[in-house]
Each structure stands twice: as structure tokens, then as C-alpha cells.
Image (cartoon, rainbow, N blue to C red):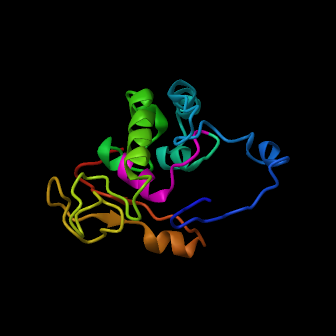
Amino acid sequence: MAAGIDLGQLEILNRAADISVVSHLGPDLLGEDWDPQTASANLAADPDRPIAAALLDQRVMAGVGNVYCNELCFVFGLLPTAPVGQVSDPLRLVSRAHDMLVANRSRWNRITTGDRRHGNELWVYGRAGKPCRRCGTLIENDLAGERDRGGERVSYWCPRCQRS
């Protein structure tokens, strides 16, 4: 049995062939063989790449989706468009990603703030136009730009707490 929330794609695989389908993926954040050093090296491999693109690349590490990507960028004070090279401690970032996913693996809703009360669970994701939980500045997003480009990913950020 398997469970998932907001899965963009799901494939049922024959166990005899599953390794060939997933062998290109980076370390699995929820796997028993989680390897933060490899994930950290994968993340830092392209310092000019936007941090959101790197976090969403399942070859870097498998498991970060759009919600966690936006929340991680906020927690680390970086715009989603900031280059990976601005991450001062890639190992700390991938470790935080692991901690977030482990803390939420048995929940139907995601909580990154530590506050389980309805409406208080996330720092920035889905909160465009609402005040930042840290500084009160209105949260921004790029929803219109993504829709125009046919994209599915939306970035959310606090223009005061997150810098490029």
C-alpha cells in the first residue's frame, strides 16, 4: 500500500523493472538509505542554477515538491530565483528538507511553521497577498507569469525576508 498527497504523476511499476525507472533519481528524502552528503553535493553542483529549479529537480534529491520548495526558500531567506551558489550551507538545507518531509510524512496536511492551527501551517506557500508571518510584508507570487508560460509551478515569497 502507498499513500500520497497532490501527486503530479504516479506510475505503477513491475518490481522487476522498477530500478531502471528510478535509478536516475537523487537520494530519497524518505528512504532508509537517505544520504545528505550526496544530496548536498548534487545541490551545489550547479551554483548558477536558481534554487527553486534545483530543489524541484528529483535528480538532486527525490521528494521535494513545490510546497516544500517554497517553504525551504523562505526558511533560508532566499528568493526562489536566487542562484544555488547563495546557499551558504547546502548540507544544512538538504537536512532541513529531510526534517520537513519526515515531520509531515504521516499527515494529510503539510506543516512547516510548527503551528498546527488551521491557516497557520505554512510560511509562504498559498499565502499571496497575506502578511508575512515574520515581518508583516505582503507575500508575493508569480502565479500570473506561470500561467502565461503554461507552467504548473508557482513561487511564493516575502520580498523583505527573502533576498536574491
Q: Quadrant of residue 60?
A: top right
> Within the magenta stretch, is there residue 142?
no
Residue lying at the far front of the rendered structure: 1
Q: Residue at x 25, y 53 (%)?
A: 113
In percent of width and height, residue 102 lies at: 42, 45
Q: Along the horizontal axis of the image, is 102 left or right of 150?
A: left
In percent of width and height, residue 96 lies at: 38, 38
Residue 89 vertical placement versus 150 (above, below): above
Return the residue nearer the eye: 18 or 148. Answer: 18
Q: Residue at x 36, y 52 (%)?
A: 71
Q: Along the horizontal axis of the image, is 73 left or right of 130?
A: right
Task: Assign the C terminus to one quadrant of the image.
Answer: top left
In percent of width and height, residue 109 lies at: 38, 64
Q: Residue at x 46, y 74 (%)?
A: 144
Residue 148 vertical placement versus 114 (above, below): below
Return the residue nearer the eye: 29 or 83. Answer: 29
Q: Residue at x 58, y 68 (%)?
A: 151
Q: Along the horizontal axis of the image, is 145 left or right of 12?
A: left
In percent of width and height, residue 155 lies at: 43, 61
Task: Assign the N terminus to one quadrant of the image.
Answer: bottom right
Number of numbered discs visible in the structure rendering: 0
Q: Quadrant of residue 10?
A: bottom right
Q: Along the horizontal axis of the image, is 119 left or right of 70?
A: left
Residue extent of the magenta highlight: 60-72
> Within the magenta stretch, is there residue 71?
yes
